[in-house]
Image (tube, grey):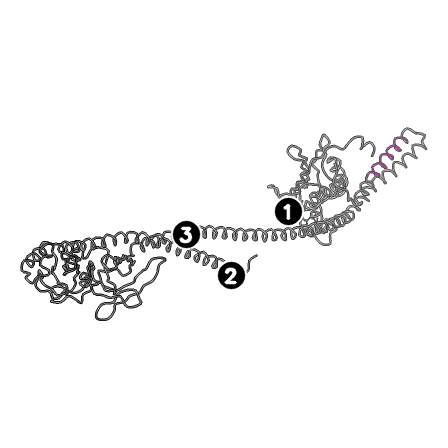
Amino acid sequence: MCNLGCMKSGVQQRLALVLAFLGVVTLLTGVVWRYAYTQGLDQLAARGEADLALASDRLVGQLQRYRDLAVLMANHPTVVQTSGATDFSGVSDLLREVADKSAALDVLVVNRTGRVTTSASGAAPADLRRYPHVQRALRGALGWGHGPAEPLTQRAYYHAAPVFDGAGKVQGAVVVITDLNGIDYNWRGTNPAAFFTDARGEVYISNRSELLFWRRPADSAGLIPPAGEAPPFAAMMEGPHEIWQLGWGPYLPQEALHLTRDLPVIGMTGEVLLDVRQPRALAFAQAAAVAALCLAFGSLLFLAAERRRTLAAANVTLERRVADRTQALRETNAKLVAEAEEREEAQAALRRAQDDLVQAGKLSALGQMSAGISHELNQPLMAIRSYADNAAQFLERDRPGRAGENLSRISQMTQRMGRIIQNLRAFARQENLAATSVELGAVLGTAIELTRTARKAADVTLDFEPADQNIWVNGGEVRLGQVFINLITNAVDAMADRPERVLRIEIETEKQITVRFSDTGPGIEMPDKVFDPFYTTKDVGQNSGMGLGLSISYGIVQSCGGQIKGSNLASGGAVFTVTLEPAMAPNTTQEAAE
Ligand code: ADP
């Protein structure tokens, strides 16, 4: 059984489980994100490398043309012939023509001291000795470099090729100046953002003009503008990749993968900034998909677990209820058993009380009958006396025949007396035996006989036809007799003051075995009450007015499995019906043995 504390710990456990699951999902999502992002960055880097290589090649190729031009011009006979001379008019035209055709900003010739002897534009500074590329050319090697070419341009690229005389000595140099504006103008705005920094870290060429002349700060990544405050910048490593976070304007990504490529041919480093938004978004989508999948799966698992838990809880409740109900039933059962025992005890007590009542009723009936019986015995006694006297006289007169007649009458009389006394004895005896088979006609006959005196005294006519065959019913001879005697006596009592006094006793065997006692008395006053003990309408002083007869009869008939009912006839009298259970005729051999 789970109490409040146990429930609380269950909730905590589930919460911990959910949190742990969320932790694992977060971790997994993070791993997926990182993996996908790194993969995306790898692909982006590969693409960026290719883009950078392309941009670099293009730049190098474009500049190469001017280097070749410088070399060609240095070998040009006119230039070779005139580089050492002072009249440059012929060369000037040539240089101008070459510059025009090749789109070079300027083409000029310097003498061996580095002074400009002639130029296509005519605007070149007079002395170029300080430029390293010129110095290099004057030493016989190919020179190159970048820098401003005022007043023509701020960003120029120089190629310087030595001019050799016939003896192979350097006698001057040809310098081709390329306007870088013209070069990066062509690919300005293309993607991705690419720029070329020189050895000092200054952006010299770029397809994003806003980055031009930005410089790399000493000992750190990124770029800062030549003037003003440096915009926000941060650099970090994402695995092998360098990521720059920048706020460098609308045309540059906010977060970019930074790639570099050394270009020793032109003395610069190509750099490219690739927007990482796409790989980031892709990695985010992949991570989100994994997280969503995990969460959906987790939710399903959680719901299933919750459902199982709820079912288990419901089961426990059900089992508890069943146990409670069973316990309640057991208690009720025990109570019922106790009640049944009590009832049995009460019934036994009632039966005892009824038996006592029967006995009491019998004694009272005995009292009633004693008068009748003494009269009944008196009559034969008187007859015996007169028969005896008669017999004596006949003997005296020597008429033994008549005397014998009288004696046999005496014998008959004593038999009758014996029967009466026998009945009386049986009546007074307490009968505790269980109901057995009794012959209804015999019992009824005895009852009628025992009440004959009373009937006669009250001048009651009996209307009774005995059955022509034996009817076996369930009951006790004495008890049933007691019932019948009681019913007959009551009818006789009821009719005492009536002008017509007829008692009718009928036996019915068609559907059930019924004995009906109907009289011509006044009828029952309170039919509902007649079977109640001590209910009587008779005077207290009268012998029979105890109000026990019918209640005892009721108990007797019921104990024999029958029924007794009392009601009034339409003609005015009362009728009592006794229904009895039919029984088998007892075994004849047993009867013979008895
Ligand atoms: P008791 O005869 O001592 O009064 P019973 O139990 O035998 O006691 O009868 C109870 C009452 O039932 C009688 O007092 C009488 O009022 C009524 N009763 C019984 N039998 C009849 C009858 N045949 N006709 C009218 N009333 C009767």
User: Is the CB of the residue bearing disc 1 within 8 angstroms of ligand 1?
Assistant: yes
Q: Main secondary structure of the magenta part?
A: helix
Expressed as whole percent of the image width and height from the top left, the position of residue 491 reads 69, 44
Range shown magenta = 404-419
Which residue lies most toward the top here?
A: 401
Q: Please determine whether, in this image, residue 474 is positioned above or below residue 530.
A: above
Q: Does the rendering let one see residue 98? A: yes
Q: CA distance from mark 2 to mark 1?
A: 79 Å
The label shown at residue 467 is none
Element on which disc 2 rests? helix
Classed neighbour count for the residue bearing mark 1: other residues with Cα under 10 Å, few (<14), some (14–19), many (≥20): some
User: Is the CB of the residue bearing disc 2 within 8 angstroms of ligand 1?
Assistant: no
The label shown at residue 8 is 2
Q: CA distance from mark 3 to mark 2?
A: 27 Å
- Name the residue type under label 3: Cys
The label shown at residue 294 is 3
